[in-house]
Image (spheres, rainbow, N blue to C red):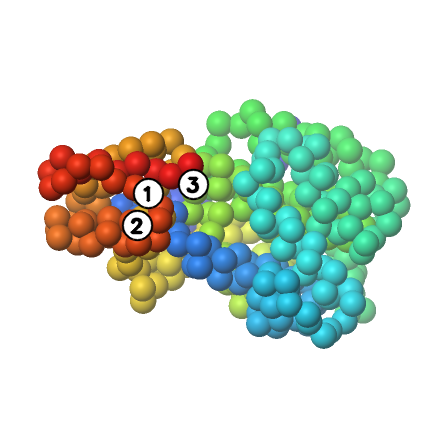
Amino acid sequence: MKPPYEINSSILRLIRSISEKIGAVNSSHLNKQSPQLRKQNKIKAIHASLKIEGNTLTEEQITALVENKKVIGPKKDILEALNAIEVYEKVAAFNSNSEKSFLLAHKNLMRGLVDKPGKYRQQNIGVIKGKKIEHVAPPYKNVPYLMKDLFNYIKNSNELCLIKSCVFHYELEYIHPFIDGNGRMGRLWQTVILMEEYAVFEFLPFENLISKTQKDYYKQLALSDKEGKSTRFIEYMLAVIDQSLDELLNYKSKILKDTDRLTYFLSPEIKEFSRKDYMVVFKDISSATASRDLKKGMDLKLFSKKGTKNKTRYYLKK
């Protein structure tokens, strides 16, 4: 069954805005970021997602863990961060349509933190905020069937990827299939769904904005529960994505450096190329800038060259 939600005018406006910004990101060559910026953004995503769940480690401490440095802090918080670092490093390997892949992600994310990670809960649970029961999850016996329906929706629905990712996120929080780790899995799997269609989402830490608007995040989940449909949560998440893209486009260093352009251009499929081939991709740079970029690539030993002047060909090193 299709999960209940409505597509209203606010959602349509946000989809249009997001689509325009993704186009701008692609044309600005920001959809494949430099290794350093990728690393920074993954750290921000990991830190923000864990912070929402009460993890006390700072962004600097998580950076240290990424760099294999020793960190002093609560053992559980460090283990949560190490698990998350491992999972986010492998995020491109997960298959958004595969329940098996989804359970493997939970197993890796929650290893050492819960009994039987990667397995659906075997007891009834509720979400408590303070002294109030915020949400009573469906009976545990229904979880396998509800999750199967949810993955069928992801596989077979003709709905836009942007909508499906938000619906999956909300429905996962509603079903609450695990004893723990539901929130971080919802945010992770929304990223997995989005990045299969839009490369930029592998490096766009929208979790950072969720962390900053955490009260609203839980409020929209609760309101969607009350109304019996995920419309409000879809609006909230699309607004978060829209603002995250805005921040990326307004990033003070959005004018690409030579290493950013080289990182974007080079791929395993390319065996050899000319300066002209390089300038076809970067239409807004001069021939002098292209030559400087290629000299930088030579200095970094990314490729070798043969020939002179206009007959120069560049060959990627194995």
Q: In this view, does 190 lie to the left or right of 240?
A: right
Can residue 38 be seen in the rendering of this structure?
yes
Q: Which residue is disc 3 drawn over?
A: 198
Per the image, the residue denoted by label 1 is 303
Q: Quadrant of the N terminus?
A: top right
Specify whether 219 is left or right of 22: right
Give the residue at x 74% y 60%.
Answer: 79
Residue at left 33%, top 43%? 303
Q: Earlier in the sequence, mark 3 or mark 1?
A: 3
Residue 127 in the image, given as x and y percentages of width and height: 77, 57
Judge whether 17 appears above or below 254 on screen: above
Q: What residue type is labelled 2?
A: Gly
Q: How far apart are marks 3 and 1 (CA)?
A: 28 Å
The answer to whether 145 appears left or right of 201 in the picture is right
Please say if the residues under marks 1 and 2 sit with CB atoms less than 8 Å apart.
Answer: yes
Question: Is 1 above or below relative to 92?
Answer: above
Q: Which of 7 and 239 is in front in this view?
A: 239
Given residues 88 and 51, the one toward you in this image is: 88
Q: In this view, does 230 lie to the left or right of 7?
A: right
Residue 226 coordinates in the image, percent (x, y)? 66, 52
Q: Position of residue 55 (x, y in %)?
A: 69, 67
**Under tag 1, what secondary structure?**
strand
How far apart are labels 1 and 2 at the CA level?
7 Å
Dot label at residue 187: none
Which residue is found at the position 64% from the left and 63% from the top? Answer: 68
Q: Residue at x 53, y 28 (%)?
A: 157
Q: Say few, some or many: other residues with alpha carbon within 10 Å of mark 3 (under 14 / 14 to 19 / 20 or more).
A: some
For badge 3, the amino acid type reads: Tyr
Count residues near mark 1 (Cα–Cα under 10 Å), then give few for <14, some for 14-19, many for 20+. Answer: some
Say which mark, if any, is on residue 297. 2
**Percent of width and height locating residue 48:** 58, 63
